[in-house]
Image (cartoon, rainbow, N blue to C red):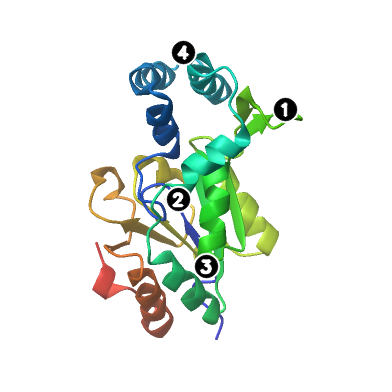
Amino acid sequence: MAKRVRIVLFDMDGVLANIHSSWEYLHSYFGVLDEARKVMKEYEEGRFDYIEWMRRDTSLWLKKKEKIHIKELVKAFDRVELNPEIRLVGPELHKRGIIIGIVSGGIDLLARRVARELGADVWIANRLVFDKRGYLKPGGIPLVGVDKTRAVRRILSEYGIPGENAMFVGDSRWDASAMRIVGYPVAYGDKCSVLDGIVKCRVRRLSEVVSLVDEIEKTGDCPSFRV
């Protein structure tokens, strides 16, 4: 019988990494959190697009420190605490023949580290840009942005997997777009009520994703994890 769940896609910030936002993490690191919150408010009011949002955010860091090398940012992200259960979940999903992916509106430098620890087969995150010497340039490449629909569909297309055989695990309103196009939208934790009308199941520990997949394969449903 064909697998009901062929791929599990994870959000990163708040799920695989124990921080609310990798962008917010760097805003705090550079001491520009208040200014960045004003920029975010302006974006949500529709004053500019996502590319400009990235430019303004990175420019805030560069106003605090004129030269920021990629090594400094990697070192800063190395201090981020990861969900310790990623080292369990990755191998267990692979044992079941399931593809593992990350789709994050966060920053690629952290996503690369998280993907390595998880054993992800594929990952997509928003990319910072650097000059030839490795110094940060204003802006970036919005490979995901805030709407994860395109990134999720790209991965599913590359692997030839229908949306109905995909699971997405997320914890915030930014994950709603991805959850609407997969067969198994899963909320991680209890923090985001916005997802209540979208998700089918809820897990409170990352390791429960493995049990959830097993239950779906055995019964075709997930009553133990039903919202």
Residue furthest right as drawn = 132
**Residue 138 placed where, x, y %?**
61, 21
Name the residue that disc number 1 marks: 131
Q: CA distance from mark 3 to mark 2?
A: 21 Å
Residue 136 as seen in the image, left or right of residue 218: right
Neighbor class of circle 3 (other Cα within 10 Å; few <14, some 14-19, many 20+) is some
Mark 1 or 4 closer to N-term? 4
- Local SS, label 3: helix
Q: CA distance from mark 4 to mark 2?
A: 27 Å
Mark linked to residue 165: 3
Asked whether disc 1 touches disc 2, contact meaning CB atoms under 8 Å apart, the reply is: no
Asked whether disc 4 touches disc 2, contact meaning CB atoms under 8 Å apart, the reply is: no
**Residue 214 placed where, x, y %?**
40, 80
Please give the name of the residue rendered at 55% of the width and 73% of the height, measured from the top-left corner.
98
Amino acid under disc 1: Asp
Name the residue that disc number 2 marks: 12
Please give the name of the residue rendered at 40% of the width and 52% of the height, measured from the top-left corner.
17
Q: CA distance from mark 3 to mark 1?
A: 40 Å
Amino acid under disc 4: Arg
Q: CA distance from mark 3 to mark 4?
A: 38 Å
Q: Quadrant of residue 119?
A: bottom right
